[in-house]
Image (spheres, rainbow, N blue to C red):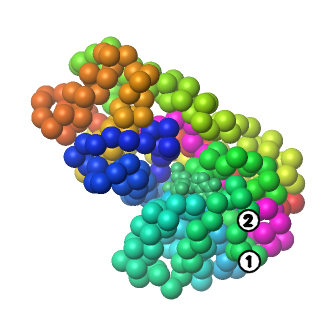
Amino acid sequence: MAHADQTAQGGHGRHQHGGHGDGLREMLDLDAEVGAAELARFTARIAALAGDHPVRDVVDLGAGTGSGTFALLRQFSEAIVTAVDTSGEMLGHLSGSARQHGFDSRVRPIRADLDERWPATGPADLVWAASSMHHLADPDRVLRDIHATLRPAGRLAMIEMESMPHFLPDDIGIGAPGLEDRCDVLMAEARAEHLPHMGSDWTARLTMTGFKIQESGDLVVDLPAPVPDAAARYAYATLQRLRAGLADRLTAEDRDTLDVLLADDGPHALRNRADLTVRSTRSFWIATPA
Ligand SMILES: C[S@@+](CC[C@H](N)C(=O)[O-])C[C@H]1O[C@@H](n2cnc3c(N)ncnc32)[C@H](O)[C@@H]1O
């Protein structure tokens, strides 16, 4: 469940179908598939903390293609999830997946820009915000709105990620070792320009808003080689987005190396490599409106 965001949009390779948004949606879906077990453990932990308090009204902020929405619907069998996103394309994709999985009666999509105002969600037992808070212009205002929306026994579950997942060994046999580490540095530079809240001190921000942090820590996905097919496609989608999003920042050598990795064929191409792994870490917070 790792994510690229707008700074890494773009690319027109074979997994890209008709535009930048498609690439992001495909990557979010693959991220959800690859991280499904870790996500299920996390939602089970939230259920354990909720104890006897029913979790019926759930709000997923910046729901994207619905990785959180569907994990929550599976965990909380009585829940209705209000999926909020500013992107009609994301919500359309989410609604299609909900129909496909028989969840449509339990999903309420709301198209809203959280930077403008809090949408009409009604009171919530659980608010979920995964890789979305750093997109907002004024996350503190939205944290206050979440606080006001939660029932007294409710919870906020928040996930943030600082860097893209890694898939390759340090030395991949072409180019200079450490390609993904260099991409991380460039991505951090790009994000600092466009997403100033990324990597901020969320513990402090939550506490300042009046939340009590119940648990925090890391969600780790660590898949050894050989990885399943979805993980290999996830690696392809991610590196393709890095190649497109960082085109102007990469050195010529690293651009060439990424092109070799993304090529349809050749001994170093991702599709022919047996050494792919998945390593991703993201931070989580489970908080109550103290
Ligand atoms: C990186 S994606 C995360 C999607 C999903 N939560 C997940 O974990 O896969 C961020 C999502 O936040 C949405 N978003 C960004 N800014 C927003 C805003 N101001 N209001 C509502 N949604 C927003 C984007 O459209 C995108 O779907």
Q: Position of residue 232 (x, y in %)?
A: 28, 45
Give the residue displayed 57% in from the left and 42% down from the top: 161
**Is residue 59 inside the magenta stretch?**
no
- Front position in the image: 54 or 174: 174
**Callout 1 amino acid:** Gly
Residue at left 62%, top 47%? 135
Mark 2 is surrounded, within 10 Å at the Cα level, by few (under 14), some (14 to 19) or many (20 or more) other residues, namely: some
Identify residue type, mark 2. Trp
Q: Is mark 2 within 8 Å of ligand 1?
A: no
The tag on residue 122 is: 1
**What residue range appears in magenta?**
145-165
Residue 22, image x, y percentages: 36, 55
Q: Which residue is mark 2?
A: 118
Label 1 CB less than 8 angstroms from ligand 1: no
| Label 2: element kind | loop
Q: Residue at x 73, y 49 (%)?
A: 139
Q: How many marks?
A: 2
Q: CA distance from mark 1 to mark 2?
A: 10 Å
